[in-house]
Image (spheres, grey):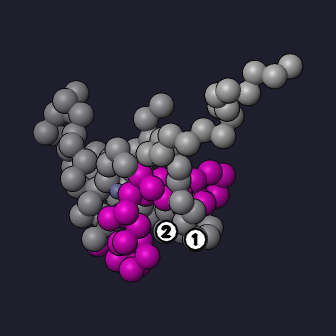
């Protein structure tokens, strides 16, 4: 399962911000912009998202407009501080205990 930063598309999101009815994932850099309340910087990061090949240049502005709206709703709906994500960077699994075969 791939988890992406909802703001810049990075494949290494580390934080989850609670919003109405869910959460938005953020990487370290986007979190920095969010914590600094720097909406311009955050939006600049959204423009780093490579456009899907199916999106022609003609529609690129629309695609970016969508990112902008997503950000605006995030700023409105933000419901609390970020919590750290754990997605597989560390593979410590509590449920696997090799060697415990006693029945
Ligand atoms: Zn990001």
**What residue do we see at 43% from left, 76% from top?**
35
**The one of 82 and 52 positioned closer to us in this rendering:** 82
Crowding near the residue tagged with mark 2, few <14, some 14–19, many ≥20 C-alpha atoms within 10 Å: some
Is residue 38 highlighted in magenta? yes
Q: Is mark 2 within 8 Å of ligand 1?
A: no
**What residue do we see at 41% from left, 71% from top?**
34
Q: Residue furthest right?
A: 103
66 versus 52 height, above or below: below
- Give percent across and percent down for residue 28: 37, 63
In the displayed structure, does residue 41 sit left or right of residue 95? Answer: left
**The one of 58 and 46 positioned closer to us in this rendering:** 46
Sequence-wise, the earlier of marks 2 and 1 is: 2
Residue marked by disc 1: 81
- Give percent across and percent down for residue 24: 51, 54
- Give percent across and percent down for residue 21: 66, 52
How many marks overall? 2
- The image quadrant of residue 50 is top left
**What residue do we see at 19% from left, 30% from top?**
53
Crowding near the residue tagged with mark 1, few <14, some 14–19, many ≥20 C-alpha atoms within 10 Å: few
**The one of 65 and 97 positioned closer to us in this rendering:** 97
Q: Is mark 1 within 8 Å of ligand 1?
A: no
> Which structural element holds mark 1?
loop
Q: Does the rendering let one see residue 83?
A: yes
* Quadrant location, ligand no. 1: bottom left
**What residue do we see at 27% from left, 51% from top?**
64
Is residue 42 highlighted in magenta? no
For the record, the magenta segment spans: 13-40
**The one of 72 and 81 positioned closer to us in this rendering:** 81
Q: Which mark is residue 3?
A: none
- Give percent across and percent down for residue 10: 32, 48
């Amino acid at each position: 399962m791939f988890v992406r930063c909802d703001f810049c598309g990075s494949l290494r999101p580390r934080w989850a911000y609670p919003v109405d009815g869910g959460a938005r994932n953020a990487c370290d850099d986007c979190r920095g912009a969010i914590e600094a309340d720097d909406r311009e910087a955050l939006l600049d990061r959204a423009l780093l998202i490579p456009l899907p090949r199916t999106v022609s240049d003609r529609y690129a502005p629309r695609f970016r407009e969508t990112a902008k709206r997503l950000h605006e709703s995030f700023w409105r709906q933000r419901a609390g501080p970020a919590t750290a994500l754990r997605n597989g960077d560390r593979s410590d699994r509590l449920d696997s205990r090799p060697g415990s075969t006693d029945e």
